[in-house]
Image (tube, rainbow, N blue to C red):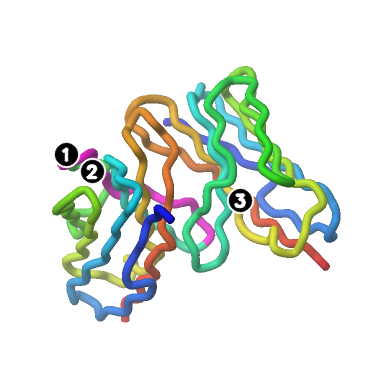
């Protein structure tokens, strides 16, 4: 079945550092989404990507929809303590609207 | 603000005692989803409604049922909760199955004693 491989699994960084995480797959997708989940809360949508090659920013966050439609990355610049959480990539490939999730990247930021 | 609301945020039930979780949305979205999320894992889709059409995932246990009485509300019923059903339950919505962005509620944390 379709699967997303998200890496790294976890990151422990110093405040102010830039962060990069990515998702890859052997399948082609039409939409890539990046969510952040805080402990005890639901995932919050950060960035949605709908077109191959699309590069989109949301404040300090930048994400790209890979040109092959099989991958996506998320960058966070100048990390701050409130960036702590689990980041999930997710993707869909058709009209079902079903999301395929990556395994998540746990980010910890040291002040 | 338009949003997805889940009640209660925390639910404690006893083994085998039926429980109902609630989701409402002000986004006027056609599709509503229920996910189960266990610790350190990605959300797992249980089922979804596209308008009044119910779509069950093949591996969702019969113990889990859902109702959508109108566009705004959707309920998750767990008929006989077991210890393995303790999890975070997430509701999400989207405009339509071909419009893929899903917006999640804050979740209900279910504890089974």
* Position of residue A52 measured from the top left corner of the image (x, y, whole percent): 59, 20
Q: How far apart are marks 1 and 2 (CA)?
A: 5 Å
Q: Which of A70 and B2 is in front in this view?
A: B2
Q: How far apart are marks 2 and 3 (CA)?
A: 26 Å
To which quarter of the image does residue B108 belong?
Answer: bottom left
- Nearest to viewer (mark 3 / mark 1): 1
Residue B46, magenta (yes or no): yes
Q: Which chain carries label 2?
A: B
Q: Residue furthest front?
A: B1
Q: In which quarter of the image is the C terminus of chain A?
A: bottom right
Are the residues tagged 1 and 2 within 8 Å (C-beta)?
yes
Which residue is the site of mark 1? B53
Which residue is the site of mark 3? A87
Q: Which chain carries label 3?
A: A
Q: How crowded is mark 1: few (under 14 residues within 10 Å), some or many (20 or more)?
A: few
* Left or right, residue A57 beside residue A33: right
Q: Give the residues drawn in magenta, as a range.
A: B40-53
């Amino acid at each position: 079945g379709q699967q997303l491989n998200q890496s790294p699994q976890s990151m422990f960084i110093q405040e102010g550092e830039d962060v990069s995480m990515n998702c890859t797959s052997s399948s082609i997708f039409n939409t890539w989404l990046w969510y952040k989940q805080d402990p005890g809360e639901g995932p919050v949508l950060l960035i949605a990507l709908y077109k191959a090659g699309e590069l989109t920013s949301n404040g300090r966050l930048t994400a790209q929809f890979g040109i092959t439609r099989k991958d996506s990355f998320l960058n966070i610049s100048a990390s701050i303590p409130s960036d702590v959480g689990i980041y999930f990539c997710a993707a869909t490939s058709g009209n079902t609207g079903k999301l395929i999730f990556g395994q998540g990247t746990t980010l910890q930021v040291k002040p | 603000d338009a949003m997805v609301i889940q009640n209660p945020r925390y639910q404690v039930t006893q083994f085998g005692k039926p429980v109902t979780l609630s989701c409402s949305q002000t986004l006027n979205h056609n599709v509503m989803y229920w996910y189960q999320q266990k610790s350190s894992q990605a959300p797992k889709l249980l089922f979804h409604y596209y308008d009044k059409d119910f779509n069950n995932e093949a591996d969702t246990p019969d113990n889990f049922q859902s109702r959508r009485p109108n566009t705004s509300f959707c309920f998750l019923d767990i008929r006989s909760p077991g210890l393995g059903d303790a999890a975070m339950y997430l509701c999400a919505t989207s405009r339509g199955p071909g419009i893929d962005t899903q917006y999640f509620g804050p979740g209900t944390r279910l504890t089974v004693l």
